[in-house]
Image (spheres, coloured by chain):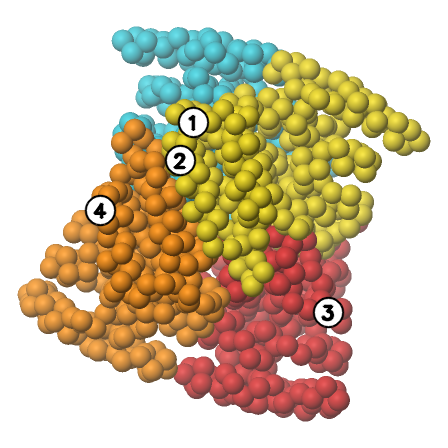
Chain colours: A red, B yellow, C orange, D cyan
Amino acid sequence: MAVQQPTITLLISCPDQPGIVAAISSFIFRYHGNIVESDQHSTNHAEGTFFMRISFTEQGFGLKQSELVQAFQPIADRFHMQWSVHYSRLRKRAAILVSKLDHCLVDLLWRWKSGELAMDIVCIISNHPDLQAHAAMYNVPYYHFPVQKETRAEDQQRMLAFLEGKVDFLILARYMQILEPFVVQAYRQQIINIHHSFLPAFVGAKPYERAFERGVKLIGATAHYVTENLDEGPIIAQDVIHCDHRDTVEDLIRKGRDVERRVLAEAVRQHTEDRVLVYANKTIVF
Amino acid sequence: MAVQQPTITLLISCPDQPGIVAAISSFIFRYHGNIVESDQHSTNHAEGTFFMRISFTEQGFGLKQSELVQAFQPIADRFHMQWSVHYSRLRKRAAILVSKLDHCLVDLLWRWKSGELAMDIVCIISNHPDLQAHAAMYNVPYYHFPVQKETRAEDQQRMLAFLEGKVDFLILARYMQILEPFVVQAYRQQIINIHHSFLPAFVGAKPYERAFERGVKLIGATAHYVTENLDEGPIIAQDVIHCDHRDTVEDLIRKGRDVERRVLAEAVRQHTEDRVLVYANKTIVF
Amino acid sequence: MAVQQPTITLLISCPDQPGIVAAISSFIFRYHGNIVESDQHSTNHAEGTFFMRISFTEQGFGLKQSELVQAFQPIADRFHMQWSVHYSRLRKRAAILVSKLDHCLVDLLWRWKSGELAMDIVCIISNHPDLQAHAAMYNVPYYHFPVQKETRAEDQQRMLAFLEGKVDFLILARYMQILEPFVVQAYRQQIINIHHSFLPAFVGAKPYERAFERGVKLIGATAHYVTENLDEGPIIAQDVIHCDHRDTVEDLIRKGRDVERRVLAEAVRQHTEDRVLVYANKTIVF
Amino acid sequence: MAVQQPTITLLISCPDQPGIVAAISSFIFRYHGNIVESDQHSTNHAEGTFFMRISFTEQGFGLKQSELVQAFQPIADRFHMQWSVHYSRLRKRAAILVSKLDHCLVDLLWRWKSGELAMDIVCIISNHPDLQAHAAMYNVPYYHFPVQKETRAEDQQRMLAFLEGKVDFLILARYMQILEPFVVQAYRQQIINIHHSFLPAFVGAKPYERAFERGVKLIGATAHYVTENLDEGPIIAQDVIHCDHRDTVEDLIRKGRDVERRVLAEAVRQHTEDRVLVYANKTIVF
């Protein structure tokens, strides 16, 4: 998290077999990269999958960005890797999408300003004009993109066109609109959503009222990547907060805000630091 | 929890209206009871319900057990109360039901022996003979009541007959048999069960495998009173434990054991201390 | 906390003896007060102390504010009570004191604006001009009161004079100045401070660096009332967050901010809702 | 931890420099080891220290145990490594030392029996005879080694002689005797202790009573390696549990037991799986 020297991070997944790590680390060594962080994980079955996140200092590394891709590709081919490379000095560009609830937005803006989130917030987009003042406070452009039920596809098409080429990922900070499949496909595994979670689960409207009626002792929040199946994408982060019979519905909502903003910020931080690998419908968070 | 002087505890619920607390505390005062703990709760709506747990020292109180009931009934009638009275020196009598998994049983036995749980364990009942040694270690009778799918109703009828008059409540410490409705009815709000909980929920077989596949970041446990609707009775206690992609299915099971035994023990403790009131399908835990 | 009907809250402590609760609840009943929340606690020793918080609806209660004090005083005298009365519609008036770190301030302002904290923020006072923009964002007056080491007593005297009659309590939201005893005395049990906590404790400068060197696995925060003994006043709220060897000093500081702002907000909420009673050097938080 | 195929684990620390990982993983690859888990950490300063834990399957690996040491030593020399090698099928041999409190012992025995702790419990040693029955329940030899204040050095010398060659590490499961320096030196970083922790810290006798008087809202536990400085060795694991004014001293002690046994078991598990590296006075727990 510190203000550190610029690093290059490789995210790799491939069928597991001996020699992968040796090949990767030898490659980095050959070009004088100094590894500062390395994590790997295997799914541990006969035909397992191997995952790796490895970061090394950019300074002193002997390959330019374009050269690195070319030089590493033969290794990637040999091991049938899916891989990506990330330069920490090239911060990811985010758009935050919100509706009327401000708790996640305010928290993200403050954390970003405090240096906790290594990203550029290109803009805030909302289907309501209400939260403009928060954007102004932090000098972030705020765009009002109304969405009508009848014209949702067109409205979102317009939004998508606006964002094109400007941002790398989207943060749904309590954006109360279902995204059209073409939006999800345009930002595959690049849209982070937050939603409440309860034990047991309450599907449908007014979940806090229903949780209250059921007398739950915990409420939680789940941050996940958005897929075409609403609220069922790969989970990035989760947490809960305790409650009891003294908590009114309003208390549950207040506690829900607390856990939602904390979990969303954690997921965004991990995403911006290239710590999340998606595999099937789950995540590896290094 | 302390080794305390014997107390008398009243559990009361009734339609909310002014004067209830004054009437109750005046009654206790009139007979020289010294209140040591008092909690109340209102559901806070126009036609709200009032809940109270009030404990006072038995020593010096001017009414015998039989007299108390008679003397308090007019107050109960006036306010349309549902109420019960509990003497701490009359410990509740429990039967623990188990199958083959021992983690909840071992934990309950040790806590009970350590004085954490103010109850008498009358017996351990199992549909398997496996855990007899633990019972012997703590000098608790262990009875093997086999259950066959085809004869479940008869088998449980036999068990019920055996328990009749011997125990006040049942603890399902990972008892892997569905209870027949007549058992549930014989011990209404007197059967405590523990089951795992996940966010999101996984219904059906092999929940840990499915949670693993989904990459959950939390696993939890819920202790509840058993009703005719499996796993949907009033929740007494809940907790969770964090996990991540490094956790194997076996790790999840291990962590699940930890949170299950902790949550079950907490629910049992609250039940034995007369801290739980059931209302609709939820609990008030004072 | 819900937008509720106005309530009157009594906070009471006195030597424990039979009849206290009956006397109080009879008093409320006599004047048609409808009790909505009631908690009590006894220190449970021979010569124990009794604590109570009892809230009833203001509407319909038969005594005006001035009459209540007069009417209740005989009961208070009879039981040797220390007591206070609080009207929820008379919100407490707070001054927030800050230096340069903004995390607690930003969080308090947002929670206050969101309706979580039932208080009026009269002003923000700082020994630095840095955080003025946050105050402006929420339309709260910001006053810069520089403090010099050589003139600290005079500087704080000036600040105290400025606040006199304007505010009921002070929130030290990372105010990096030691308060003079005369300030503490002017707001006895009305100044809330937040500080980091570690296991084991690290006294002195650069605590996060020292915690990092020691490899702690937890960092925490403590909110307490300020007494003449620095950081040793009655504890209102505490919490921790897990950390490990991967956390840099900067990560520890980031996590510390998270737990500090959460714990301070919780303590302020409890204080504004008249939930905290101080006894000896500890608190009862109802 | 799953019942897995046998692995070989290398624990390594050395001055950080490029090429370490490449050298290690190339070595493993050369002898056909299949890496199943790998973690590394750098202290991230100019003259940083590098830490690594790397596990690979024993089956198929081309070097026998004696050959491995010889073959790896040149790499170790080149990078000035401190290193050790661990075979998972060679379980560590533990002695558990207890006095009269049984909560940690009972929990360790059950977890060990359940397969959570990959160690052999060679014996239980106590300065009291009280807990013999628990040892018998799990078929573990129990030895009573009385310790007298006047003869403590001799008594512990006798115990040490008895243990010599029999055990690899010691678990102090609430062993209420200060170990003589010669015991600490005989098992350097091989003695795990558990002690309570409070925020703020309470040094001296009756810590729970003093925490109660101070009104703490959290109690915790710390597991650490024993050094000559009592309770100040490298921390392996820590956790806390919430409490409030309703908790009596006895409740605090009960909660303390819960967190102590949980934290000690976690530390023992990490130790037995060779996940802990000690550096200066801190640990890296992979």
Identify whether A12 is placed above or below D178: below
The answer to whether mark 1 and mark 2 are in CB contact below 8 A is yes
What residue is pinned by disc 2? B30
Of circles 4 and 1, the one toward us is 1
Q: In which chain is the residue bearing label 1?
A: B
Picture coordinates of residue D223 (x, y %)? 44, 34
Q: Quadrant of residue B93?
A: top right
Q: Are marks 4 and 3 on the same chain?
A: no
The residue type indicated by label 4 comes to: Asp
Q: In which chain is the residue bearing label 2?
A: B
The C terminus of chain A lies in which quarter of the figure?
bottom right
Identify whether C202 is placed above or below C33: above
Q: Residues within 10 Å of mark 3 (few under 14, many from 20)?
A: few
At horizontal 32% and vertical 12% (from top left) the residue drawn is: D153
How far, Cα to Cα, is label 4 from label 1? 27 Å
Q: In which chain is the residue bearing label 4?
A: C
The answer to whether mark 2 and mark 4 are in CB contact below 8 A is no
Q: Residues within 10 Å of mark 2 (few under 14, many from 20)?
A: some
The residue type indicated by label 1 comes to: Gly
Picture coordinates of residue C154 (x, y %)? 7, 68
How far, Cα to Cα, is label 1 from label 3? 63 Å
At horizontal 62% and vertical 13% (from top left) the residue drawn is: B139
